[in-house]
Image (cartoon, grey):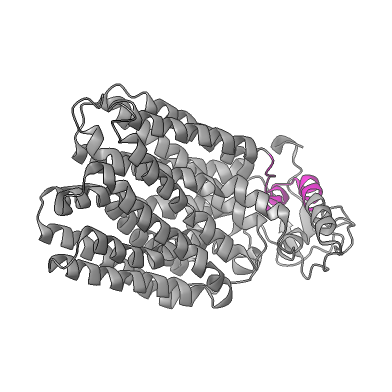
Amino acid sequence: MSTAEADTGRTVTTNIPARLDRLPWSRWHWTIVIGLGTVWILDGLEVTVVGNIASRLSEPGSGLPITSGQITGLAAALYVAGACVGALFWGRLTDRFGRKKLFMITLVVYLAATALTAVSFSTWWFFAFRFLTGFGIGGEYAAINSAIDELIPAAYRGRVDLIINGSFWLGAVGGSLLSIVALNTDIFAKDVGWRLTFALGAVLALVILLVRRHVPESPRWLLIHGRDREAEEIVTSIEERVEAEKGEPLDRPQSEITINQRHSVTFREIARTLFTDYRKRSVLGFSLFIGQAFLYNAITFGFGAILTKFFDVPTGDTGYYFAVIAIGNFCGPLLLGKLFDTVGRRVMISGTYLLSGILLFGTAWLFDQGSLSAGTLTACWCAVLFFASAGASSAYLTVSEIFPMETRAMSIAFFYALGTAAGGISGPLLFADLTNTGKVADTVLAFQIGAGLMVAAGLVAAFLAVRAERRSLEDIAKPLTAAASSAASSVRGKTGGSKPGSSPATA
């Protein structure tokens, strides 16, 4: 049934959300993680490669008349600006037309823009397609995070979200190692190696696109938009696969929800939800995104420049150092993720932000004292980013689960765009200026600004973070379409199904 054929305007009582949340972890869930989560690996590859090849691109013979400062400053800012615009543009469409339709389209946009970056023949072409690559990635953030949260059981949502968002750093490891090969002029010419790195990103995106075809639309989204038969078919199919794998019937779902089906919500309703109904949660989301966006977009884009400028690390060797801190970044969400579902969101979110900020202040002090080498600076960054990475990933988790379902993608897009615009656009521009001066005090200042924003965000989380661990999305934030109670006039329908362990719904 298409969206146009959806039967909205009805009141439906269903247990579909409860049926999804009570599922044990299975092979089917791994297909979701692989199909949707692997795109962050591409994002990590993109950002890291650009940072590491900045020095090579600025050299004569690279094929582009561009400076290192333009790459780590303007090009980085354009990529982030594209991501911000893309998040807002695609986020609205994701809430209106569905998760699957949009996470397919945005990946195609990313794929095409990355491929065209590889054939850049002038500075303006390179800048334009860096913007469009970010435009595609921004849409991915909104579509993917909303789809993942709506498909993953409540008991696993925190750790899965963190690990998926943290997989960005697997791409960063790959990008670092790839840049080592690409920058080796014994293997590739100066104007060839960097192009191949972008081309590889496009090839990987094509593979992910083929895998992603098998990921279903969110049953929660279908249900609210009047396509409950499709939602029922998808959930029943998932239950059958899980029961066959586990060899035993599933537990009976424990709750139902009554909703008034409709196609979309207005911008006025979205604004009222964010700035009136959930004002404190909006402050939380904004704080978390500004802190992590400034830290990551400001520092990681310029890490290679710091190594070459202050420690005389050869351009071709910066990838080794970045690979080390990228591994530390991925280990944070991987090892701490489970604690977000057990210890709880408030303790872990505030704790990771505060610890990373404090450790970064310490790193800034050591750097100022001249006590660090390239190796020990990298070790300090590993410690900082072990906690910061878990905290940054929890920012996406937070805004994707604490607002009503009808505004989920737009909420993710809004906070991502707002926080990243504040920290991600101004950050690279400011940091490029500070590191290019070659003055230790200027780089220390940049470290301190990032650290201060992380600590501030941690303090906000200590007071405002929502205890969302192991709770249904509908319990954390009641859908805008939810009815006060089941309508007495409703009639028996099919949205609950007749599977063992499920109860019928009324429609």
**Residue found at x 85% / y 56%:** 244
The location of residue 473, given as percent across then percent down, is 63, 64
**Residue found at x 30% / y 35%:** 184
The location of residue 498, given as percent across then percent down, is 90, 57
Vertical side of 64 occupied by 305: above or below: below
Q: Is residue 133 magenta?
A: no
Is 473 left, or right, of 466 in this rendering? right
Q: Is residue 215 magenta?
A: yes
Q: Nearer the viewer, residue 431 or 52?
A: 52
The location of residue 423, given as percent across then percent down, is 30, 54
Q: Main secondary structure of the magenta part?
A: helix
Which residues fall within the magenta stretch?
214-235
> For the N terminus, which image quadrant?
top right
Q: Nearer the viewer, residue 232 or 73?
A: 73
Q: Nearer the viewer, residue 40 or 327?
A: 327
Is 68 left, or right, of 258 in this rendering? left
Vertical side of 107 occupied by 431: above or below: below
Is residue 141 in sight in this rendering? yes
